[in-house]
Amino acid sequence: MSPPLFTNFDPDFNAFLTRTAASTDNIHWSVARNFLLDEGVGRERAQCYKKHGVMMGHGDAAAWRGKHTGYLQAEVSIQSDDFGPPDSVDPDEDTCPETFRFPRMPFSSLGDDLDAYLVRVEHIDTLARELVKRWNGAISESESCEKVLAWAKGALMNDPRASQDLDGLFKQFSKGRDLCPVFAGVWADVSDLFGDAPEGDVPGWADSLRDRLGLQHHDPKQPNDGIDVLVFRYPVHAVPRLSNPGDRQRPLVAPCVLDGDLSDAFLPSPRASDTGHTVDLAGARSCDGLTREILHPAMRLRAKYLFRVGAITRPVAPDVIGVQRGLHLSYLRELFHYSTYAQHTDGDLL
C-alpha cells in the first residue's frame, strides 16, 4: 500500500507539515497531521494544490491558511451564476469543484441508494443575514432571526404560507453563492436521537447532533448564548446528479483535507472507506457508533426537507480535539482492521 501522498510529494511542504505536526502546542498541529495522514488525496489534486503556491514559503500556519483559502476559492468553492446550484454536475467542466473532478476514490456506494437519507445543520443567523440583505436593511438581524424561526416553525406545522416564505428565502440564499461541496451526515447514524414527533426526541438532541456531526464551530461559548439551528433531512435522490443522463448514481464522496477549510475538527478516514467519519465532540461509545459523513454537490435548501428546529446550548470543551482525536483514531483502526493507521502521525495519542 502506497503511503499518504503528502508524506513525500514535496520535500519542503513535507518538512513544514512535519514541524507543525510535531507538537500539540503548535497552531494547526492536528491539521498538519491530517495532511500527512490522508490516504485519499490523488496526485492530480496535489499537483493543483502545488500549482496555486500553497506548498511553498510558509513562515507560519497563518500564511498556510491564507494560501489554502486561495486554492479553495479557485478550485473548490467555485462561484456560481445568478441561478444558483445546477441540477447536475459535469466532472469534465472547469466549473465543477475539484472534489468531484478528482474524487479520492470511485464515488461512494451511498450514492446508489437513492432512497437513503442525509442530514445537515444550518445556522439560522446565516439565513437571517440573507433576509436583511433581501429587504435592504429594513429589518434588523435579530428581527430577521425571529422571522426565519417563525417561518421554519410554521413550515413544520404544514403552514403553506410559511413554507412558501421559507422557500423564497432559500431560493434567494442560493443565488450567487459559491458551489462549495456540502458536508452531510448519514441519517441512519443519528436517527436514534429523534422520535416520530418532536415530543419523542431525546432531550438535548441539538447538542448531541452537533457533537455527533463534529460541528465544532457551532459553539455557543456560554450556555445562555444558544445557537438556533435548522435541521434538514433529505433523500439522496435530492442531491444534484451527474450530467450523464444514463447514470442515476449521485456523486457522493468521502472528504479529504483539500475539500474545506483547515479544520481541527476534521479527521480523514482510511483509504478503504468510501465515506468519512466525523469526530464525535462528546466521544463515540464504540467504533460502531461513529457517524459517517459525505460530501455532495451544492444544492438549494427546500422547506419540504426541513426536519427540526432547535437550539444548541452546550459549549464545546476547549481541549476537545486533543481529547477525542486519539479515541477516534483508535476506533478507525478497529473498524477497518488497520492496526498501524496514524501511527506515523499520532503515535503519541494512541
Image (cartoon, rainbow, N blue to C red):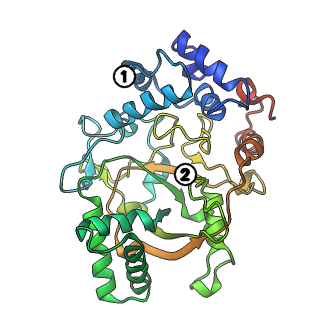
- State whether residue 1 appears in this view: no
Nearer the observer: mark 1 or 2; the answer is 1
Quarter placement of the N terminus: top right
Q: Residue at x 29, y 62 (%)?
A: 173
Count of numbered circles in the view: 2
* Whole-percent x, y for residue 29 in the image: 66, 31
The 10 Å Cα crowd at callout 2, few under 14, some 14 to 19, many 20 or more, is many
Q: Amino acid at mark 2?
A: Glu
Gap between marks 1 and 2 measured at Cα: 28 Å
Name the image quarter holding residue 17.
top right
Identify the secondary structure beneath mark 1. Answer: loop
Between residue 267 and residue 153, name the one nearer to us: 153
Q: Amino acid at mark 1?
A: His
- Secondary structure of the residue carrying tag 2 is strand
**Disc with the residue nearer the chain's start (1 vs 2):** 1
Label annotation for residue 52? 1
Q: Please name the residue that numbered disc 2 is placed on.
A: 293
Q: Residue at x 50, y 50 (%)?
A: 294
Residue 190 x %, y %: 62, 65
Query: Residue at image x 31%, y 53%?
Result: 241
Q: Is residue 160 depicted above or below 109 in this figure?
A: below
Q: Identify the image quadrant of residue 339.
A: top right
Residue 332: image location, x then y, percent: 71, 42
